[in-house]
Amino acid sequence: MHTHQWIITYKVAKYIQDWFTNLKHERWVGNMHAKINRGYMCSKCNQSLSPPDMSQFPLSQMADTFHETVIKGTNIENLYLTATSDEVITLKQFLDSQTEPLDCIIDFLNLMNIRKFRFCESSGSFVAEVIRQINKDFNLRRFCLVSKGIGIVRRPEFWNPIKMLGNQLGISVHKFCTNAKSEDDAFLLYMAMKSGPQCYIVSNDEYNNHRYSSGPKLGKQISRWQSLRQLVLQPHGRSIYQKPSKCDLCVHGSLETGWHIPYYDGYKKFHTAVDSWLCLRRLE
C-alpha cells in the first residue's frame, strides 16, 4: 500500500472508516475531511506525513524512454506518429539552447479552451495573469508555452503583456510550437521530464494515451509524477487550477501511528487532482 498509487472513492473510504470505528476490541476515530497542509501535516490529527521523494523518479531516464517510445516510435508502424523528424531535431535544439532548466510547461491551447479565453489581441494579458499566479504560488521563474503553431502565439502584441510581466517579476517565458498535425502533448511531457524534478506542467489533460503508449512501467511512473507536479486547470470559478498533491498519493502510516488514505471526493475523477484524505487514529 505504501508503494502503489492506490486512490479509492469516497464510498470505499467511508466503508473503511466505518470498519475501523466499529471494531469491538480496538478504539479508532476516523475523519473523512482531512487535508494535508504545506508542512505535510494532517489538518485533523496534526501528524506529519512523509514529504514526496522526487528522487524516486529517474526523470532523465524516463524522458529518454518516453522520447523513444512515444515521440519517435519504436517500429515502422508508429515511427514519428506524434511528431515529424524535423520537429524532433528542433526539440533537441530548443532544450539544448536553454541556459537553465525550465520550471513550468504550459499547455497553451488547453489553457485557452478550459478557461474560455478568447483568441484575440488581449489573449496575452489572460496568459500573463495565469503566469503571475503560478509565480506567486510556486515561485517558478522559467516558463514555456507549448502549442500547435497557431497564429496568435506568433504575434508581437500577444507577447507584450507577457514581456512586461517578465520585467516586473524577473521571469522568462518561452514558446515551443509544433505542426498542426503533431501531438503537442507529447512534447510537453517530454520537456517537463527532461527539465528535472522542479518542473511543473499546467493542463487538465490526463495524458492517458501517452502513458499507455509508453508502457506499463513508465506509464505508472508518469502517473505518480503527475500527481506531484501537475497543476490541473479548472473550467469554472476564481481558482485557475487545482494544486498538485503535497504528498505521494499512497496509504501513509501504520497500525501504531494511524492511517492516512487519499480518496476521490465527489465528482472529481482526475487521477492527479486528489486533496481529500481519510484520517484514522487509534485511541489508547
Image: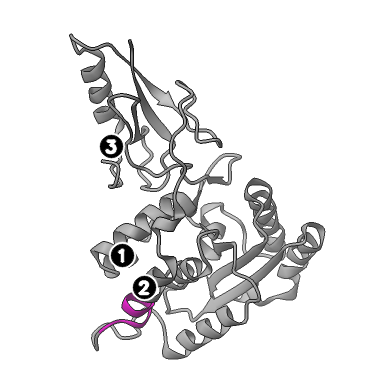
The amino acid type, in three-letter code, at marker 3 is Ile
Q: Amino acid at mark 2?
A: Phe
Q: Quadrant of the C terminus?
A: top left
Q: CA distance from mark 2 to mark 3?
A: 28 Å
Question: The residue under label 1 is which amino acid type?
Answer: Leu
Q: Earlier in the sequence, mark 1 or mark 3?
A: 3
Q: Choose between 134 and 221: the one closer to the eye.
A: 221
Q: Is residue 187 left or right of residue 99?
A: left
Q: Are the two marked residues, 2 and 1, in contact with CB atoms closer than 8 angstroms? A: yes
Residue at the spot 46% in from the left edge and 43% down from the top edge: 245
| Count of residue discs | 3
Going by the image, does 26 lie left or right of 242? Answer: left
Q: Which residue is mark 2?
A: 66
Q: Residue 1 in the image: x percent, y percent?
A: 25, 41
Q: Which residue is the site of mark 3?
A: 8
Q: CA distance from mark 2 to mark 1?
A: 8 Å
Give the residue pinned by disc 1. Answer: 218
Question: Which residue is located at x 47 percent, y 31 percent?
Answer: 48
Q: Between 284 and 238, which is closer to the camera in this rendering?
A: 284
Q: Is residue 195 visible?
A: yes
| Extent of the magenta region | 66-74
At mark 3, the secondary structure is strand
Q: Earlier in the sequence, mark 2 or mark 1?
A: 2
For the residue carrying disc 1, how many other residues have a C-alpha within 10 Å: few (<14), some (14-19), or many (20+)? some
Q: What distance separates the C-alpha of mark 1 from that of mark 3?
A: 22 Å
Q: Position of residue 37 (x, y in %)?
A: 53, 33
